[in-house]
Amino acid sequence: MTETAAAHPVDPFAAQALNAVEGLDPVDPAYGHVLRIKTLFNALPIAIAATMLDLMVVREIGGPYGLLTGLSWLLGAIAVVTFPARRAQRWGFKIGEGQLRVARGWLFRTDTIVPFVRVQHIDVGQGPVERWFGLSHLIVHTSGTHNSTVMLPGLRSDLAAAMRETIRRHIQTDFA
Amino acid sequence: MSDGSAALSSDAASVDVGTDADWQRLHPATLALSIVRLGPRTVNFLPALAAIGIAGKWIYVLPALGVFLLLSLAAAWFGWLRFRFHVGADQIAIESGIFARQHRTIPFDRIQDVSIEQGLIARALGIAKVGFETGAGGDTKDEARLDSIGLYAAQALRQTIRAHRGGAAPAAIAPAEGGATDAAEPVGEDRLLFAMTPQRLFVAGLFNFSLAALAVVGAAMQLFDNLLPFDFNIFNPVDWFDLAERYGLEQWVVAHRWVAGVGALVSLLFIGFASGVLMMMLANWGFRLTREPRALRRTRGLTTRTDVALPVRRVQAAILVTGWLRQRFGWHELRLQGLASDGEKEKDHQVVPFGRLAEIDPVLAEIGMARPPAEQPWQHSHRIVALGGFVGAGIAALGGAGTIAFGQPLGWIALAAALPIAAGAWISAHFHGWTEIGEMVAIRSGWLKPKTTLLPFASVQSADLSIDFILRRFGLATLVFGVPGGSSLGSHEIPAIPRDVAEALRTRILAARTRP
């Protein structure tokens, strides 16, 4: 962290820090809840399976009974409680000057810019969990082989629709 | 028509006669072709035959095979009967399907060019497969094609479509450096840009040294050991002893054991070189690259001749590839990345398989590109790009050491390989670099297989700035570009350059407008 920390004296783990430094807008905090519920759906079967394994195998062979169950539920709980909000904070976007910028991740951070004139078509989608929180995700398609789709989740549905309109207008003006 | 297509026409070919008013069918010889294709397809039938055989009802095998062949032929016949196409004034319509009918219309305006392909049997029959390159992305399987019509009909069709395009105004969509080159070129005249002479093919084949065929030959020798009319395995020094013995050289050979080793080695080398030359000849025999009003056109192939046009305006990037050794002799290969893929296997188009830089430069000039001049300063990637190789070498060393600890001497191979892997990664890291020439970025990489990519700013559809936890520590970033059309040589990226430099470069590249 030596050089970067010196250049940007911000705690990289602080909420919003990364996006603020890079001049990006955060996604809706409710997206953290969406991620949390998705994580829950992923973690629950694993924890249950670990418990079953513990009950049926570890106890039979006289291993450390209870360790696997405790560990899996503990790790699952940590994954559900702590990380989703942080992951949501790592998403950032900026719309303007004829381009869409989307950044995501921290350990492996990717910061993508798509000029509006390069957009082939746009999707706005909404999953059941997202609908619950009134969120949508925006997908822009480019003709590039790499990055043929760029996804931006965690937008309030009206904002997503507005962004789609903004981008759509640019596509039209380019062709006219 | 250029010389290329004249060379293509081998035998006499009859022109199709329309059955309905203007609708035409495929060439009847296509049916002959489908009979030939039945041969390999019969293999699908083998499990069924085996099942019948196992049931002990051998008497049904022949009738079953006959029914299968008959049904296949009937299907081919109906397929031929129900396939028709119509060449209109400004569009081509294709109707196909035995039960489910499909009607497809392709306006000439949307056809970038027409490719003509002839296999060995198709050449004997004087027919050719015609493919319409529309520039629509996605599956090549979905591309419209006429399989097959008479060669002359195919060439006439191409002329018709090209003439139509020639008369029309230039297309509005233009993702390539047009302008200057378009104005300068003489309209309607085809110029030869590059050709491969047999001598050149031979030299190229020598550099194409491949031991891949060796594995096949070796495996075949193992498999058919007892079937071969002679009992001689050229890779086995013992067989060379036997050979010497037979000719009374026994005493001499025992005294000079190394002769047997040399014999095995020489045949090894011979097969490597011979297969390299053979593969080069098969693929690139009669290679010709010509400049046409709108496209670069390439004809090549010994058994399967292909005739492919790459619209100049659709060229997205140029890739110069060479090898560590062939570079010493001044040989290079040029590939162009277009929107469509080249045939079914390759993603980019090989336009100069083996040539001097002096031959490649004019081809690049045709598409409005140029290699960076020799005095152009290159900016280098950080040496951290070698880290991946180091990690690989470390894993190999650890694995090797572990295996040795378990008493398996083969582990020494992995342990010995670790050092060259690490050294290779370290040396390769010195060759990663990029430079900017006008509205184009040149990216180079590789030491054993040097590669230089010329990427016009206007081809870039999106740009990623990737920073992982290691690059962040050094204040570095990797730029990854989204470019239309695939390349078999990997994605376009500039790894591990200072972050502010990367951001500035990205801004410059994305600011470039779509070319007029």
Image (cartoon, grey):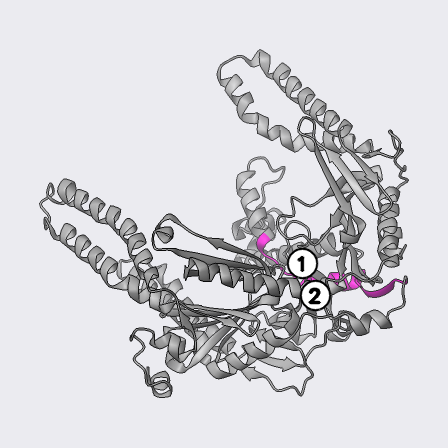
Q: Nearer the viewer, residue B287 or B514?
A: B514
Give residue B390's position: percent from left, percent from top: 40, 72
**Mark 1 or mark 2, earlier in chain:** 2
Magenta stretch containing residue B204, yes or no? Answer: yes
The residue under the point 37% across, 59% down is B410
Q: Residues within 10 Å of mark 2 (few under 14, many from 20)?
A: many
Q: Nearer the viewer, residue B16 or B246?
A: B16
Magenta stretch containing residue B229, yes or no? Answer: no
Same chain for labels 1 and 2? Say yes or no: yes
Residue B187 vs A134, above or below: the answer is below
**Which quadrant does the C terminus of chain B fall into?**
bottom right
Q: Quadrant of residue B299?
A: bottom right
The residue under the point 75% across, 34% down is B95
Disc 1 and disc 2 in contact, CB within 8 angstroms: yes
Query: Label 2 lies in what chain?
Result: B
Q: Quadrant of residue B199?
A: bottom right
Residue B75 vs B168, above or below: the answer is above
Q: Nearer the viewer, residue B392 or B281?
A: B392
Single out the mark in the foreground, 1 or 2: 2
The residue under the point 67% across, 66% down is A174
Q: Amino acid at mark 1?
A: Leu
Give residue A72's position: percent from left, percent from top: 19, 53
The residue range painted magenta reads B189-212
Give the residue at mark 2: B175
Label ID, residue B339: 1
Q: Secondary structure at mark 1?
A: loop
Query: Label 1 lies in what chain?
Result: B
Number of numbered discs visible in the structure rendering: 2
Give residue B368's position: percent from left, percent from top: 75, 73
